[in-house]
Amino acid sequence: NRGLRTIRLEEVKGHGAGSGKPWVTRGTKVYDITDWVEGHPGGEVILRAAGGSVDPYYVIWKIFSIHQKKDVYDILESYLIGIVDPRDLTNGAMPEESIEDPFSQDPSRDNALHTHSSRPCNAETPSCQLTTFITPNNIFYVRNHMWVPTPPAQAKLEIELSDGEEVSFSLRDLKEKFPQHTITSTLQCSGNRRSHMTDATTHTSGLQWTVGAIGTATWTGPLLRDVLEKSGMNISRPPSSAKHVQFTGHEAYGASVPIEKALNPYGDVILAHSMNNEPIPKDHGSPLRVIVPGHVAARSVKWLKKITVSDEESTSQWQRRDYKCFGPNESGKEDWGAAKSIQEMPVNSAVTSISEMEGKGTVVKGWAYSGGGREIVRVDVSVDDGKSWDQACIGCVNEDKDANGQPANKHWAWKQWHYTIPTPNGNKDGREKKDGTKRIIAVKATDEAYNTQPEHFDPIYNVRGNLAAAWHRVPFEGGK
Ligand code: MTE
Ligand code: MO
């Protein structure tokens, strides 16, 4: 081995993240990554492995290097400093107990969730449980890019202003020194309904969510603008260097929002410590997460560690290399730098349940949601695949009363709607067609800006399957 020195595992252990000289092992080789971590995408993640084996992190580390030419392991090779002392090996391999599992702190999860991947956990709410205005915490969808971190109990939220000024607040400060706000906000993943785009087109890459990468909860905590103001920022005349607010999570996920959203007195961006009146569950960002109502959920950073006010967007690849959308012809030749980050979500809707009501016909239920606080003003339902339409009932449940804290003209939450297809004798015949073919229910929503959903997926196709918002069409066997 080119005369490499042998190194005891004890010595590797001494080179943890806080040591200033981080080392990692890969297989039985030892690497000094000190010069590499600084300023490299994924550097923070690799630090999580410092003092031990990087092997369990490879899957995740790969995420950081999708758009880099060199494989991370090739890069590592140039930092090789030695091999693990054979005395510390078991049958020539690293002893199992010496390899830490980054997912060991992940919580157990409700069996009702539909799991797309377990490490990291990505799971959606079953559609039949999406029919309530508030989604219970235990079945709220989970979208994790990495493991669930456990921030140290004494960890303080760090704030860095655009002039470089740094302050920090304990969780207690955030709960006690600021007015607390409760808002009701929907969170929706940009990939929600991706599987519908896949079905309608050819192929999309990413988690194949159906209709359940969305949910609504009440969130409680201080307003971000209040916290920025107390940090010393002049929020009524912000400096021109303050253009974006970046958020970093304890496991190194990061994203940002434009400063206007953060400072808007009607923007309702909060640093939430409670979800549906309970401390935020581990999967959803315990103990503190950002809630950016009306924006794609990717900006609502969980396990919040740091807030940075900057003249540029977050440098994370979730801001720069994902959560952007392209034309149908641009797949494979995306100009990531030129495309705009997804922030406010477009109008979307879906069918979540179809049930026969004895003597009453078929009841169809679903959700409808638009970004930017734009209210859903109409939901159109068709039982003949769009040839004729009728309106669903959306005002029937007094949801706006349940929705806490929304400013008069902002609608951060979805609307639940329902539509009854009358029994065969009615004029809205829901039975099978005479030739026995299935009917297609189609639904589309319209928001207060009179934006509505496209009929087909082809014109909004993008290979990442983001913003899949075409009409939701569901075959059904109506009537008896
Ligand atoms: N924050 C951190 N720290 N890590 C993450 O992986 N995922 C984002 C966002 N915030 C993520 C994060 C994405 S893409 C989504 S859709 C939402 O969290 C999901 O929130 P939920 O798991 O509470 O439903
Ligand atoms: Mo997401």
Image (tube, helix red, strand yellow):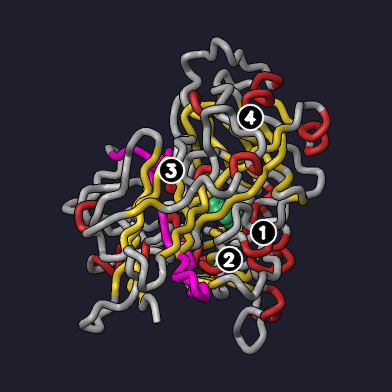
Q: CA distance from mark 4 to mark 1?
A: 25 Å
Q: Earlier in the sequence, mark 4 or mark 3?
A: 4
> Callout 1 environment at 10 Å: few (<14), some (14 to 19), or many (20+)?
some
Q: Quadrant of the C terminus?
A: bottom left
Against 130, residue 271 (above or below) is: above
What range is drawn magenta here? 339-363
Q: From the viewer's perspective, is 257 left or right of 424?
A: right
Which SS class for mark 2?
helix
Q: Nearer the viewer, residue 444 or 246?
A: 444
Against 353, residue 311 (above or below) is: above
Residue at coordinates 66% horizontally, 71% vertically from top-left?
110
Q: Earlier in the sequence, mark 4 or mark 2?
A: 2
Q: What residue is disc 3 on?
A: 370
Q: What residue is disc 1 on?
A: 136
Q: Report whether residue 72 is seen.
A: no
Mark in front: 4 vs 3: 3
Q: What residue is disc 4 on?
A: 224
Does the magenta portion include 352?
Answer: yes
Q: Earlier in the sequence, mark 4 or mark 1?
A: 1
Q: Nearer the viewer, residue 477 or 188?
A: 477
Q: Is mark 3 within 8 Å of ligand 1?
A: no
The image position of residue 234, as x and y in percent, is: 61, 13
Q: Quick check: marks 1 and 2 in contact, CB under 8 Å?
A: yes
Q: What residue is disc 2 on?
A: 129
Which SS class for mark 4?
helix
The image position of residue 412, as x and y in percent, is: 54, 39
Q: Report whether residue 98 is seen.
A: yes
Q: CA distance from mark 1 to mark 3?
A: 21 Å
**Circle 1: residue type:** Pro
